[in-house]
Image: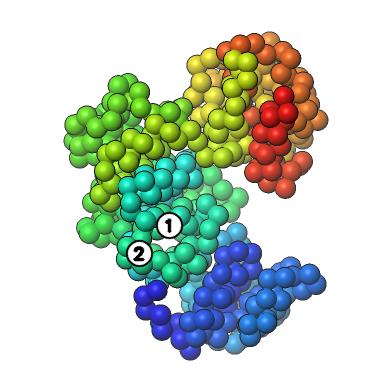
Amino acid sequence: MKNAKQFNGMKVLVLGLAKSGFAASKLLHAAGASVTVNDASPDHGNEAAAVLRSEGIRVICGGHPAGILEDGFDFIVKNPGIPYSNPVVAEALGKGIPVWTEIELTSRISEAPIVGITGSNGKTTTTTLLYHMLNIGGKQPLIAGNIGTVSCTVAETATKENVIVLEASSFQLMGTETFRPDIAIWTNLYDSHLDYHGTSEAYAEAKYEITKNQTQDDYLIYNDDQPELRKHALRSSAVKIPFSLTGMKENGISADNKQIYWNGEPYVKRTVIKLPGQHNLENILAATAAAILLGCDKTAIENVLSSFTGVRHRMQFVKELNGRRFYNDSKATNTLATKSALAAFDGPTILIAGGLDRGHSFEELRPYMGNVHKVVAVGETANRFSEFAKSCGVSTVLTAADVKDAVQKVYPLTAEGDIILLSPSCASWDQYPDFEIRGDRFIEAVMEL
């Protein structure tokens, strides 16, 4: 850990526990800071709070007491999900107190180079692809960030021989000040999380934080097929590495129907790639470019491309059974993600969709429903999705109690060559605690067949 004494003697408020708050509290306390933790959840049964107190850290649970900022904090580390409208956050910003997320700590302490990966979609797949390429290539990567591992904990023990591959959400990036990855990847830009950011422009600016502090010594790998994203990329001072599916890039990475090209020269044949979908090809280009920049040899990259079939719950191939192929895309919690999933397949598709009803339209899916010949709708949106499917001319539309019931009902109606795709286009919280559990239930149902 570099600059180990930089927090010594500082007064810090950690707002919100969860994994990131717990990790930040322990790190800062060990670094000599005076840490106060404020968590809105009740004190009773709060195991994380009990652990921190046992280590001598002050913890206040059950809400945000008035005047908490009167203690004179040097900075705040907040949970990424806490909105900036939160009274404590708003007051702190009004007083000029820096408000960070824990990836700012990562940037300040990491001895290892950092690859920061963001985008509206594709972050996790790109992060995982790159991690595997670097791992096989002997680059000692460490995976961190929004993918599930708290990055400041990873950075605490990382060395110069490691590479931190960090997935960063817009929520996390908003809370940065000096965060500067050696390589930044920006996969794409679509409107998302507007309930948090307020406007498309504010959301895009949050994403831009991935490259805002980069210099000409750093690299920005970005989607050149999106004019809006390209506009932001051109603001960056980093060396720009565009990726494209629509045109050759003499100083970047691109693909046509036969090849992936690096700086305009053939690099890898498309026939090597196992991961389906045009959107995944974009993720592959971004990860491959970063791996090349980090000195990963071609053999390691080809090894991953020829074996990687998807991240769990993201276009994950589950099983082929009697000529039917099952795919788990439970992470598809919006129409944009389901649209990409449907576009990935040319064959007859059976779509299992539906979930939490947020009132959003499914119309974006209409142009992609051509290969869908059966739909099984579940959850709160079951009736709305059924009506939408019928309006698209889908020949068979069923409803089911949940994803397990959907698999059991539809399997007898399938034929050899069918693709059975769980891509809900909705969040899971009407029936499941998270999309991972929804996906696991789908996999279990397939295996029970």
Q: Residue 151 location, x and y as percent?
A: 48, 62
Asked whether residue 210 appears in the rendered view, the answer is no
Please give the name of the residue rendered at 20% of the width and 40% of the height, measured from the top-left corner. Answer: 251
* Precedes in sequence: disc 2 or disc 1: 2
**Lateral position of residue 256 relative to residue 385, left or right:** left
Q: Are marks 2 and 1 in contact (CB under 8 Å)?
A: yes
Tag 2 residue: 112
Asked whether residue 56 appears in the rendered view, the answer is yes
Please give the name of the residue rendered at 22% of the width and 59% of the height, measured from the top-left corner. Answer: 217
Q: Quadrant of the N terminus?
A: bottom left
Tag 1 residue: 142
Could you say which is closer to the camera, residue 198 or residue 388?
388
**Lateral position of residue 226 relative to residue 149, left or right:** left
Please give the name of the residue rendered at 54% of the width and 71% of the height, measured from the top-left corner. Answer: 24
Q: Give above or below for 37 relative to 397.
A: below
Report the amino acid beneath label 2: Ala
